Image: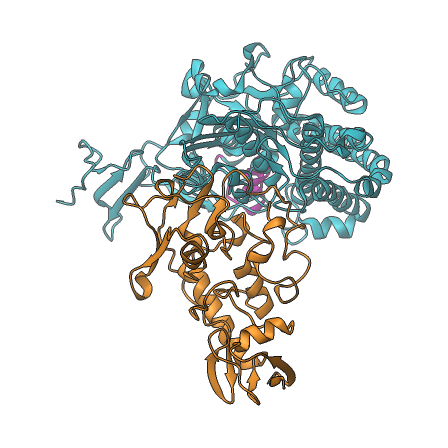
Chain colours: A cyan, B orange
Amino acid sequence: MADTSKGIDELETAQDTARLKRVAIEPLTRVEGHGKVTLLLDEDNRVQQARLHIVEFRGFEKFIQGRPYWELPVTVQRLCGICPVSHHLGAAKAVDQIVGVDALTPTAEKVRRLMHLGQTLQSHALHFFHLSSPDLLFGYDDAVAHRNIVGVLADHPDIAKQGVLLRKFGQEVIRITAGKRIHGTAAVPGGVNKAVSPQERDELLPQADQIIEWAQGALELAKRILFEDLESARSFAAIDTNMLSLVRADGALDLYHGGLRALDPAGQPIFDHVDYRQYGDYIHEQVKPWSYMKFPFIRSLGPDAGAYRVGPLARVNTCDLIDTPLAENARQEFRAFADNGLVQSTLAYHWARMIELLHCAEGIKILLDDPEIMGHELRVSGQMRDHGIGVIEAPRGTLFHHYEVDEDGLVTRANLIVSTTNNNRAMNRSIRRVAVDHFDGREVTEPLLNRIEIAIRAYDPCLSCATHALGKMPLEVELLDAEGQRVSRLYKNSKGEVGLPDREPTPRGCYIGD
Amino acid sequence: MIEHFSLDGKRIPFQPGQTIMDAAMQAGEYIPHLCHNPEFRPRGSCRLCVVRANGRSVAACTSPAREGLEVESDTPDIQADRRSLLQMLFVEGNHLCPACEKSGNCQLQAVAYYCGMLAPDFTHLYPVRELDGSHPDFVLDFNRCILCELCVRASRDADAKGVFGISGRGIGAHLIVNAPSGKLGDTDFDPHDRAAQVCPVGAILPKHKGYDVPIGRRIYDRKPVSLVGDVADHQEDMS
């Protein structure tokens, strides 16, 4: 396998930034949340540094401390307006463990699974049709005013309409399972507070075949776009990484539950079927001074070699099968594309995403046909425990929710590793790949900058979810004189200690002597 | 002979000794309120029930009805005053409906909807208040207390326990628990106490139950507070 990291890793931090020209892409468009990319260019427009920054800040891990555990599934889903269901269910899986429940009733599990398939369907449709299809349909260099969903509506009304209606169907599945289209409350500790009524089922089931047909069309579209200019699509923002996801006990794709599987770039297992409650033994997080977002890595491989990708590309690569027939056929074709090795092309995220869209459409029909979603056994209970860890495959990738509670049932500690955080290192490497391949020595133009955004959009990042620690962000402040010379410098480390960079930090205060 | 007063032009009968609020409630006429519950002695502290009686502003829950009194309640200026009062209640505590398990079962939220309060115009104070989870069955979330004193009166007058009190003055006033430790777990507070059932907001909450009743099936989800009545009347719908 070619080493695609060559030449890009040193672009994380330039040696001497004094003479470099700064170009910022801010705000990033057609992504969830607020982020920016900064590029430092030398006199010959060669890129010396490229970074993806997340500029917003959420603080959830901190402000849920002291709150009751039973409100977590509802509170933490406010992290996001696009995939709140994933946070709702991730937290619910964790609080199931807190109330001593390891297995739900069939009705509760199927209602939750149906909710999650609806969520993934609507999120994937939103991402592919609304956010990414303008680049893919019109090309990187299309006029900015046209390169958006309105442009798609004008030029390809059928495609745009299908995208809107696919998303609407997913939202309706969420409504009947979660109680509301956005920020529902159905998943409660040990189960659900409502089942699906026959009337609700009958509203949606007649539409299921049409949705499957449109999902097949979306998959064909994603493939056609990728194969139109295969060589450039294959190399665009390409990096070779490890991949991580949940898989079912038989190796099947499972978005709701399973064990952790990590594969190296050659497709060999790093670990497999790991109980996700042991995630701390396998995944660590690194903090860097220039980003609000942490950098997770596979512990046994270290911070650099241990970087991995999550999300549709990882899931369709790591699983051994998909248990719905149309999506399984598509998976086999996908893996054959890389001679059954891992498909590493960043733009193949869209292909994998549409395979999952089809899987969701098929899975929703199967569950709507299952009478157990209308059952009456909704909840179970057990002996209270002092912690719980819930892991789920959110649309954008593996999502970890970890809570500890005291004997009063109030949260004492929380750790959330969200999908976009898992992809942080990979996204940074992908934009450096684009910078090296497309920028060096050329005059910076809007279409060039859009290439950076296209690389980021392929991952479907949700930037708002990704920053949530409070009081731990390392920060460095520089004071410059009128000539731009540094007068003094101050920093705060990840423990909140403040000091000068060349002295030991003090927890009590800071040196402002010079 | 039965005596009458008028409320927004309607003739309201009353018995001697009844307040304007008593008579209005008995006649099925709604005057917005939060601190009033006919089971307990009126307190007149929330000021939401202030009406104009013969041109004078009075609290309906503490003012006696009188023959021939002309009472105005549902007028644009009085409703505007109520919205301002509600806004102040919202900004004094941490009333975050989207993240509150009482949403849909909350009288403060319901009265705010009834009076047309959309968002506070005042600056949020964002007080820092910790929860008391020491009791095995109940949790106190002081962030949401509006100092209505219903729990104080219920515990003292109905339960004969005196578990709750209000300490401090003005903006420093706050709910306290009558135990050396200040913790609810160190009192004889019981889930069957009346004080456990009268809180109009999400300050006194049963543990482990937050979202047992789905959104959409809660007491104020389908009908306004003017038709449904107070939280304290609907304990059977809350769990």
Image coordinates of residue A459 in percent, x first then y, are 59, 33
Residue occupying the point 61% across, 85% down: B4
**Who is closer to the viewer here, A263 or A266?**
A263
Part of the protein shown in magenta: A440-455
Identify whether A121 is placed above or below A306. below
Identify whether B214 is placed above or below A359. below
Q: Is residue B56 visible?
A: yes
Instruction: Identify the residue at the far left of this view.
Output: A513
The answer to which quarter of the image holds residue A249 is top right
Identify whether A408 is placed above or below B159. above
Instruction: Identify the residue at the far top of this view.
Output: A268
Image coordinates of residue A75 in percent, x first then y, are 52, 43
The quadrant the C terminus of chain B occupies is: top right
**Who is closer to the viewer here, A50 or A438?**
A50
Left or right of residue A84, residue B84 in this image: left
Image coordinates of residue A42 in percent, x first then y, are 39, 38
The quadrant the N terminus of chain B occupies is: bottom right
The secondary structure that most of the magenta stretch takes on is helix
Image coordinates of residue A165 in percent, x first then y, are 77, 45
The answer to which quarter of the image holds residue B184 is top left
| Magenta span includes A179 | no
Q: Is residue A434 visible?
A: no
**Who is closer to the viewer here, B33 or A9?**
B33
Left or right of residue A90, residue A47 in this image: left
